[in-house]
Amino acid sequence: MIRNTLLWLSERRGLQAYILRSRIARTVSRRFVAGETLGEAIEVARKLNSVGIKVTLDHLGESVSDPGGATQATMHYVRILERIAQEGVDSGISIKPTQIGLAIDEDLCRSNMKQIAEAARSIGNFVRMDMESSEYTEATLRVFYSLRPEFDNIGVVVQSYMRRSEEDVRRLCGIGASVRLCKGAYKEPESVAFQQKSDVDANYLKLLATLGECSAPLAVATHDDRMIDAGRQISQNGRRDWSFEFQMLYGVRRDVQARLVAEGYRMRVYVPYGTEWYPYFMRRMAERPANLAFVLRSMVGK
Ligand code: FDA
């Protein structure tokens, strides 16, 4: 109920404008968002690197509705890649396909994604295509499959709440594609997605087992102890190399991040930054009502 309300609010533009103007909300968002500028994000990446954690940078923004905005976002990602190389930080990038044009035109998104993948390849870097709501799943995968033969430095995301994911995982394994497995963060109808946490978790474990058996690079993206344990198991069964890593979100379960590093696992943290932090921030609130209590307490000054 709270989750659904927060996910609904995450799509309300009116509230977004109000929250973005609030100085307190901006301050509180810093727990999950590195800052508003690339410089601030690089600083956070550097700090994480210094404790053995790799990074993937996300310039916040989604559902861009004009081609000019999509081109601007594309150019910004190329600049991020240049800056990563200049500064020597250990970071890839994560991109929401609708930020670079998927909600406008699939070919536009493909061409922008190609430009970013080329820029990344020229500096030996990697680009992850985030997975958004189910409206875009098929188109995101089409863009990915069309570029993958030319670029092995791109990867995609599979969400365990989606009923179709088992089939997607088989096809992705078949071509050796790099997969980040997560549970899924959007509000989806029952026709396409499991609604019960127990079903989403069971499917996560099932997909993880399949991904563990194929040799494609795998990122286990979760903060859930049960999923992490299953990831450990897979890794110990022969996947303890560069092709296996855990991933978590910036500001979430920092103690567990440190523990996995101490155990010798590759750990990557997803570091978002930028001015458009509202929908991202609201999805994080939806995942854990305790975070909402933390925010409300900060806003009333207690
Ligand atoms: P779950 O939500 O069941 O939480 C398990 C436990 O983890 C909780 O009990 C709590 O202890 C802790 N926890 C979880 N979220 C927390 C939070 N926000 N604050 C504090 N504690 C928290 N989704 C998507 O749809 N498309 C995508 O491309 C991505 N990309 C992505 C990248 C990375 C690196 C991560 C880690 C996650 C994503 N996600 C995503 C988000 C993902 O789908 C999911 O919504 C969250 O990771 C929460 O799911 P968990 O697996 O953590 O389990």
Image: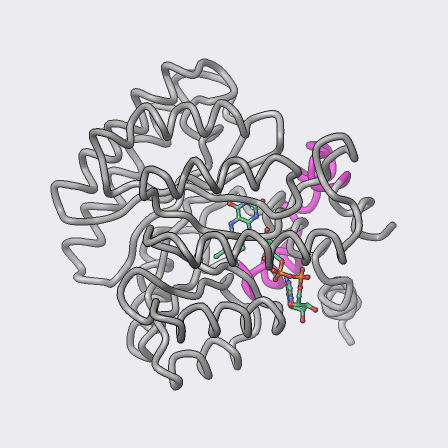
Task: Determine which quarter of the picture holds residue 142.
Answer: top left
- Counting labels gives 0
Q: Is residue 9 magenta?
A: yes
Closest to the observer: 193 or 70? 193
Specify whether residue 25 is painted magenta.
yes
| Point 34% across, 67% down: residue | 239
Pick the residue in front: 59 or 249: 249
Is 213 on the left or on the right of 240, as rendered?
A: right
**In the displayed structure image, the side of residue 298 where residue 209 appears, left or right:** left
Q: Position of residue 110 (x, y in %)?
A: 34, 22
Closer to the camera, 134 or 48? 134
In the rendered view, tell whether residue 150 sits above or below residue 7: above
Q: In percent of the image, x 38 and y 79: which residue is there?
A: 261
- Residue depicted at 49% across the width and 52% down the height: 210
Q: Position of residue 197 (x, y in %)?
A: 76, 55
Q: Quadrant of residue 230?
A: bottom right
In the image, the segment drawn in magenta is 8-32
Q: Position of residue 285 (x, y in %)?
A: 70, 56
Ligand 1 - quadrant of the structure image: bottom right
Can you say whether 130 is above or below 224 in the image?
Answer: above
